[in-house]
Image (tube, rainbow, N blue to C red):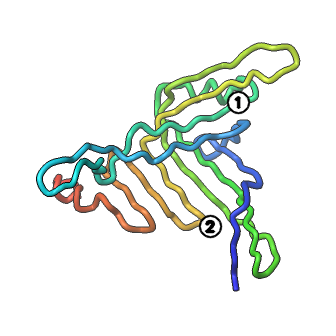
C-alpha cells in the first residue's frame, strides 16, 4: 500500500526565455488570492466574501539574488519575460520504504515591478531581489498540467477544467 509523504524540494533551476540559466538564491511564487466582494442581504444569514470566478488579485513572483547579475538587470526591461522554473521534489513512499523524485514545472509570463540591488557589505552577499507581476502561470507536476491561469485571455484551469470557459462564451470571446 502506497503511503506517499511529500518531503522537500531537492533543488531547482530557473531559466529566462527558455535558455539562460538564472543564478538565483530562491524564488517565491505568487499565491492565488481570489478577488472577492462582500455579499449580504435577504436569504443570507450575515455576510460572506464571495469570490469572483477565476479572477485573482495581483500575483507577484520574487527572485532573490545573492548579488546583482546581468540577468537581474535584464529582467528590469519593461516588457513581459518568460520564466521557466523546474524543481525536483522529494517524496517518501513509506509503504515501499523508498524515496520518489517528482518534477514540478512552473512557467510564468511576468512584467518587472521592482529591482532591489541589495546592499554592499564586506564579505557578504548583496541579497537583492526582483519582483515581477505575473499575468500567465502554468503549473505542472510530472509533466501533467495542473493549474493554468491567463489573466488576459480569461483562462483559469484546474486539473483540466476551465472555470472561465462559460465566462469567455458570455463575453463573446470563445
Please indicate whether residue 10 sits to the left or right of residue 74 in the image.
right
Q: Badge 1: few (under 14), some or many (20 or more) residues near its Cα, within 10 Å?
A: many
- Total marks placed: 2
Q: Residue at x 21, y 54 (%)?
A: 45
* Horizontal arrangement in the rendering, residue 72 relative to residue 132 (left or right): right
Q: Nearer the viewer, residue 8 or 78?
A: 8
Residue drawn at point x = 66 percent, y = 44 percent: 14
> Which residue is at the far right?
123
Taking depth in this image into account, of 89 and 148 the one nearest to the observer is: 89
Q: Which residue is mark 1?
A: 65
- Residue furthest to the left in view is 42
Are discs 2 and 1 less than 8 Å apart at CB?
no
Earlier residue among tags 2 and 1: 1
- Relative to the observer, which residue lies in front, 56 or 140? 56
Check disc 2: other Cα within 10 Å, few if <14, some if 14-19, many if 20+: few
Position of residue 138 relative to residue 76, above or below, is: below
Q: Residue at x 52, y 43 (%)?
A: 30
Location of residue 116 by image quarter: top right
The disc at residue 142 is 2
Residue at x 42% of width, y 68% of height: 160
Amino acid at each position: 500500500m502506497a503511503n506517499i509523504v511529500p518531503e522537500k524540494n531537492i533543488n531547482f533551476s530557473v531559466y529566462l526565455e527558455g535558455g539562460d540559466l538564472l543564478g538565483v538564491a530562491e524564488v517565491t511564487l505568487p499565491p492565488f488570492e481570489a478577488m472577492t466582494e462582500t455579499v449580504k442581504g435577504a436569504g443570507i444569514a450575515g455576510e460572506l466574501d464571495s469570490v469572483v470566478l477565476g479572477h485573482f488579485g495581483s500575483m507577484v513572483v520574487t527572485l532573490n539574488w545573492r548579488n546583482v547579475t546581468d540577468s537581474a538587470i535584464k529582467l528590469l526591461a519593461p516588457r513581459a519575460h518568460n520564466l521557466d522554473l523546474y524543481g525536483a521534489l522529494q517524496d517518501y513512499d513509506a509503504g515501499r520504504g523508498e524515496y520518489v523524485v517528482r518534477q514540478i514545472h512552473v512557467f510564468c509570463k511576468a512584467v518587472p515591478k521592482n529591482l532591489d540591488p541589495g546592499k554592499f557589505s564586506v564579505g557578504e552577499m548583496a541579497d537583492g531581489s526582483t519582483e515581477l507581476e505575473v499575468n500567465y502561470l502554468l503549473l505542472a507536476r510530472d509533466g501533467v498540467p495542473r493549474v493554468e491561469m491567463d489573466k488576459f485571455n480569461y483562462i483559469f484551469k484546474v486539473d483540466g477544467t476551465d472555470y472561465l470557459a462559460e465566462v469567455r462564451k458570455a463575453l463573446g470571446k470563445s
